[in-house]
Amino acid sequence: MKIFLSAFLLFTFVACNTPDKAPEELASKTDPQVALDFMNSYVKSCNELTNPEKWVAKNKQLSNEFKAAYRKLMKEAWEHDPELGLGFDPIFDAQDYPDIGYRIKSFDSKTGIVQLESSDNLGYHAKVRVKLIGNKTLVDGAGVIRMVAH
């Protein structure tokens, strides 16, 4: 009886923890629009002179890992140079950005990399990595934050 019960519990545990979807199918459900919405919302925030660090901390489109990496990078930058900090925006990976925002140029569903270009054709580009976490697409990398393969 103990063997039967143990086997039943093991089978139930394995069956309940088996993903319903193959990795390829999960990747195909990753929504690149989240990257575009995030970056255009960030542009709007920067145009309104909102504190980017508080904005990032409150943003629900970002993974917790992104927020932690951003916080660490900014803390170290301000400690190293209290007047200038990083000297550029780590999300844009630049000092300047398009005032009216971006549009999607391309999306690689295998890597989650969304290539963005400025809507005004002024030559601004940005890369954002999205990831399906649970059943929700979140931004997990942008600019210089978490853009190395994880």
Image (cartoon, rainbow, N blue to C red):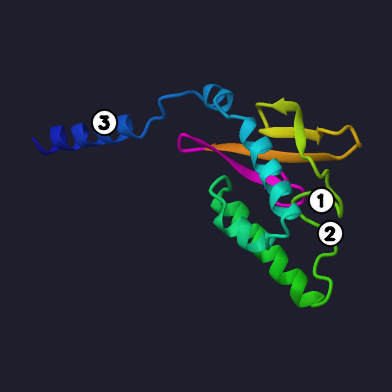
Stretch of the chain drawn in magenta: 133-150
- Of 38 and 79, the residue lying toward us: 38
Query: In front: mark 3 or mark 2?
Result: 2
Helix, strand or loop for disc 1: loop
Per the model, the C-alpha gap separating discs 1 and 3 is: 48 Å
Residue 23, x across and y down, in percent: 53, 27
Pointer 1 or 3: first along the chain:
3
Tell me the residue at 58%/53% (across/down).
65
Q: In the picture, residue 73 is in which quadrant?
A: bottom right
Residue 52, x across and y down, in percent: 68, 59
Q: Is residue 136 magenta?
A: yes
Q: Is residue 77 above or below residue 69?
A: below
Q: Is residue 64 magenta?
A: no
For disc 2, the marked residue is: 88
Tell me the residue at 66%/62% (across/down).
53
For disc 3, the marked residue is: 11
Helix, strand or loop for disc 3: helix
Of the 4 image quadrants, the one containing the N terminus is: top left
Pointer 2 or 1: first along the chain:
2
Q: In the picture, residue 34 is in which quadrant?
A: top right
Residue 4, x across and y down, in percent: 14, 32
- Of 29 and 16, the residue lying toward us: 29
Crowding around mark 2 (Cα neighbors within 10 Å: few <14, some 14 to 19, many 20+) is few
